[in-house]
Amino acid sequence: MAHAELDRLQACLNFALDTLRKEMDNSQLPPLSQHSSVEHPLDDSTTYLPSTGLFEARRLSLACLGELKNLIQSPLDKCMEERFTVYGVACTDTLIKTGIIDYLSDVPNPSQGVPAAELASKFELDSQKLVPILRCCAASGWVRETRDSSFALNRCSRTFIEGNAGRKLNFSMPGFMSMIETIPHWVAESDWKLSRSPEQTAFQIAFNTPLLAFSWIVENPDVLVPIADHLQVYGDMSTPSVVADYPWEQLQTPVIVDCGGGEGGLISAILDAHPSFRAIVQDMENVVPLTSSIMEERRPRDIENGVIKVEAHDFFQPQPRIGNEYSFILRHIMHDWPDKEAATILGNVARALGPKSKILIVDMVAVPNVDSTATTSVKSLMLDGGAKGPDYRIPSHFGSASRIVSGSSVHMLTMINGCERSLREWEKLVKGCGLRITNIYPLRAHTSIIECALDTRALL
Ligand SMILES: C[S@@+](CC[C@H](N)C(=O)[O-])C[C@H]1O[C@@H](n2cnc3c(N)ncnc32)[C@H](O)[C@@H]1O
C-alpha cells in the first residue's frame, strides 16, 4: 500500500541526514554522540558558525523529524506530552538550582556519573524525588542514566554548567510560569483582551504591576543582570552569522550605532572583525552603567580611544546621531514592540538617516504556516550538495524546526504585545517610516538581517 506522506518524509529525512553527515565531514567535525561527556563544536551557536549546507541540513532534518512525529504520534499522546513539557522545564531548573549539574561536571569519572543516592546525600535531598526528576531530564536528552538510578552529564547538559551559555539562557524571572498560566484569561476574558498596549498584557496581570515589562525589570535589581545576561546569550546565538553573512565592507558610514545594544556583545564582535569602524552602544539610562562596566573591562583601549562610546538614549526620543556618519543596528528590538511603538522607534532612527546610512534590523521573519514546500532550504542544499533531492513536502515554515520562532512570537505577545513579523508585516512597517527594504540577508540562525535605507523614491 502507498504511504505517500510517510514515504516522502522518510526520503526527505534520509536526504537531509546524508547531507548533514557529508557537510560535517567536509568541515572536519567529529561525529555527534549522545554518550559523549565532552561538548561538540556544533553545540554552541554563540561560538561556532556551521557551513550554510550544514546549517540547512540540520534544520531540514529537524523539520522532517518533527513532521514525522506529528504524522505518527496519537493525538492523545501528543496532548499528554505537551502538558508534561512544563515538567521538563521544572526538572532542568531543579538540577541547576540544587547544584547537581555543577557537581556532576566535577566528579572523578564524569562519563560514569554517580548514584542518585550520592546526590541526595551530598545535597540533603530525597533520592525518591531525584530519580524521577533525573529520568525526566534523561528522556529529553539532558542527562544519561548510566546504570539503574545512576546519572551522568552528557554533552548537552554541559551548557548548564556555571558560566556556560545555556545556564545564562535558561534564566526566567520568578513568576514566569504564572504569566504563562494567565495567557488564556488575558486573551479570552480579561478587560484587555482587545488591547494592543504594551502596558496591558499577561505580564502586568501576572506580576500585578502597571509597569511596562522593561521598566519593571530595571526597577528589580535582582533580575536586571541575569536578564541582561540571558538577552546577551540569546543575541549571541546569531552574532557569528551577523558578522560573517553581512557585507560590512560595503557599509559607507564610519560609525555603527547599536540601538538598545544591551551588554554590547554584538558591537564588540563586529569591531573585532572590522576594526575600521567606530561604534556607539545606546541603551536605557539604568542599563548603560552595566554596559559601560562590561566594555571598560573587556575593551579598555577602545573606550579610552573613543572607538566605542556607551550612551544613554531612549529610542522613543529623537535619535541624536544624525547624518551620513552613522548606520544603525536594531537587534531583537522591533519584535519587543506592538506596531504603533515599533513605528515610533523605527521612525526616530529613520529621521536621523543620511542618504548613505543603513538601518540593519536583526530579527526573525515569521513564515506563515501554509502547507507548501520549504523551498529556501531545498535550493540551498542543492546548490551546496549538487544533489537532486527527493520530492519534499515540508511546510514552508519548517514545521517544528520553527518552534523557536512561533514560541518567541507568543513570548513577545505575552510580555509586551510584541510579535515576530512576517515579510509582509515588515514591509508595511518599514514603508510607513519612509524607508525601503534594500536587502534581506538570511542568517545561519533563527533571525535575518533586514537592511533598510531612506526611500528616496518617496520624495520624488
Ligand atoms: C531584547 S534586548 C536586545 C539587546 C541587544 N540588542 C541584543 O541583541 O543583545 C532589548 C534591549 O532594548 C533595551 N531597551 C528597552 N527599552 C528601551 C528604550 N526605551 N530605549 C533604549 N533601549 C531600550 C533593553 O534595555 C534591552 O537592552
Image (cartoon, rainbow, N blue to C red):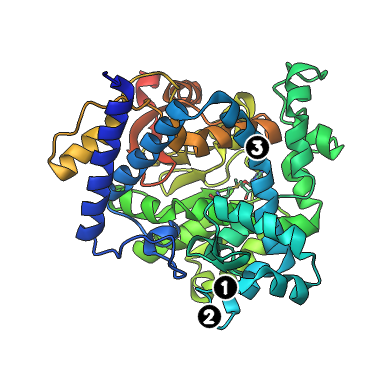
Residue assigned mark 1 = 113
Q: Is residue 112 left or right of residue 217?
A: left
Q: Secondary structure at mark 1?
A: loop
Quarter of the image where the C terminus is located: top left
Rendered location of residue 245, percent (x, y): 32, 49
Q: CA distance from mark 2 to mark 1?
A: 6 Å
**Vertical arrangement, residue 126 with respect to residue 335, above or below:** below
Element marked by disc 2: loop
Q: Which mark is residue 109?
A: 2
Indicate which disc residue 316 carries: 3
Disc 2 residue type (three-letter): Asn
Which mark's residue is nearer the viewer, 3 or 1?
Answer: 1
Of 351 and 120, nearer the camera is: 120
The residue located at (39%, 26%) in the rendering is 455
* Residue found at x 57% / y 30%: 78
Q: Is mark 1 within 8 Å of ligand 1?
A: no
For residue 376, what is the image quadrant? top left
Give the Cα separation between the discs numbered 2 and 3.
54 Å
| Image position of 97 (left or right of 344) | right
User: From the viewer's perspective, is 443 left or right of 232?
Assistant: left
Judge left or right: residue 430 versus residue 410.
left
Cβ at disc 3 under 8 Å from ligand 1: yes
Q: Secondary structure at mark 3?
A: loop
Dot 2 surroundings within 10 Å: few (below 14), some, or many (20 or more)? Answer: few
Q: Amino acid at mark 3?
A: Phe
